[in-house]
Image (cartoon, rainbow, N blue to C red):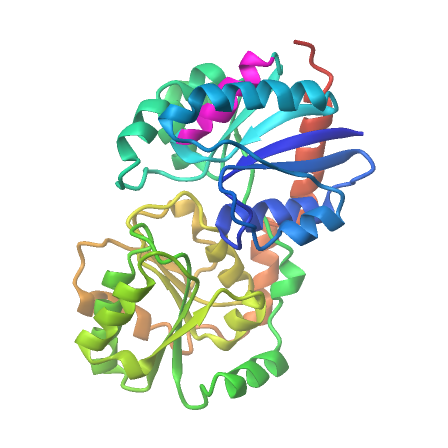
Amino acid sequence: MIRILHSVSNMDRAGIETMLMNYYRRIDRSQIQFDFLVNKPKPGDYDDEIRSLGGNIYVSPGLAPWKFPAYMRFMKELLRAHPDIKILHAHNEGMMEYALKGAKSAGMPVRIAHAHNTRIIHDYKWPLKVFCKQFIPHTATEYFGCGRDAGIYYFGKKRWAEKGVIMHNAIDPARFAFSEETRARMRRELQLDGKFAVGHVGRFNLQKNHKRLLDIFAALLREKPNAVLLLAGEGELEEPTRQKALALGVADKVRFLGVRSDIPQLCMAMDVFVLPSLFEGLPVVGVEAQASGLPCVFSEETTDEVVILPQSSRLPLRESDEAWANRIAACDGAVTDRAAAIEPVHAAGYDINAETAKITAKYLAWAQRKA
């Protein structure tokens, strides 16, 4: 058995982490085990499940510049102590250079850099992330992306064309297969009878653009006063989002649902899914929503690869709030057979069962590589 070390922030319920758990649950763990290198000491939502599946969680010294020497020592000691770790698979935006450099210094021959986005969030770490990003193509040996645009952003057109591998943000479509019974039950629980439920699942951060989403929703209410906005997730901008809802006078129509473990059922309760992100790679939640038969409205900053259903579309962020509201309102009743969405999702390459077989073959082949 070989072990793959995934470098992440920590294993909370978020897009990258959920995608990894989708693969981890289905991979043949008699052949391949996942371990996780986290850079935050706080426990993750998935930690208990990881350990129950046989995985290990290692906490690094952190990704601050002054911790770089300690991080390098940590990686060398970790990989020396665990020779069954054969591959590093890094997912940390620009900061994945730390893990890649540490693995390279330790002599690990297979180092996967995985691009999950088409931009880097402009926060206080932005200069460091951009600085580190430029070295990634030279410390990685393999280039992965959730989609074409993310791969090009991190590795360049030439490298991506020569060596890029798309690892789909795959899901188990059966979990999202639409059920009228589940929809009725969830709508009762969420008190949505007679409501037009607009859904959004995502971390409350700059990228997901909740501020604009509330402006769009306020415009939608002028056209559809029975609309309700469901927001699932948590994050640093949750409180400012609550305050903006109050300022717009729409707080009584906005439901803050927190982190949820029942996203498939929640999607079935919705009538449309909206993601006006400032930038995206290929959001797994967009695949999940469409697997449940939901029409989706994405910003054009989200790669066109995410559009799976004919009822889903992309809209430029420069369009007015009213234009967005009109597009969302047009989704009301646009899908008559939501259960039929499973086949298009499978055909587009987002079925976790087929995708796990592909990544298993790559891992096993690369694990034979010598330093």
Q: Residue 103: within the magenta?
A: yes
Q: Which residues are magenta?
A: 95-106
The quadrant in which residue 4 appears is top right
Residue 326 seen in render: no
- Classify the position of the N terminus by image quarter: top right
Q: Is residue 67 left or right of residue 318?
A: right
Residue 215 seen in render: yes
Residue 242 vertical placement versus 113 (above, below): below
**Residue sitting at 75 percent across and 24 percent down?**
84
Residue 302: image x %, image y %? 35, 48
Q: Residue 240: within the magenta?
A: no
Q: Nearer the viewer, residue 121 or 67?
A: 67
Residue 16: image x %, image y %? 51, 45
Q: Nearer the viewer, residue 269 or 336?
A: 269
**Residue sitting at 17 percent across and 54 percent down?**
318
Residue 136 vertical placement versus 357 (above, below): above
Q: Is residue 270 left or right of residue 314?
A: right
Residue 171: image x %, image y %? 60, 53
Residue 346 vertical placement versus 84 (above, below): below
The quadrant in which residue 152 appears is top left
The quadrant in which residue 35 appears is top right
- Classify the position of the C terminus by image quarter: top right
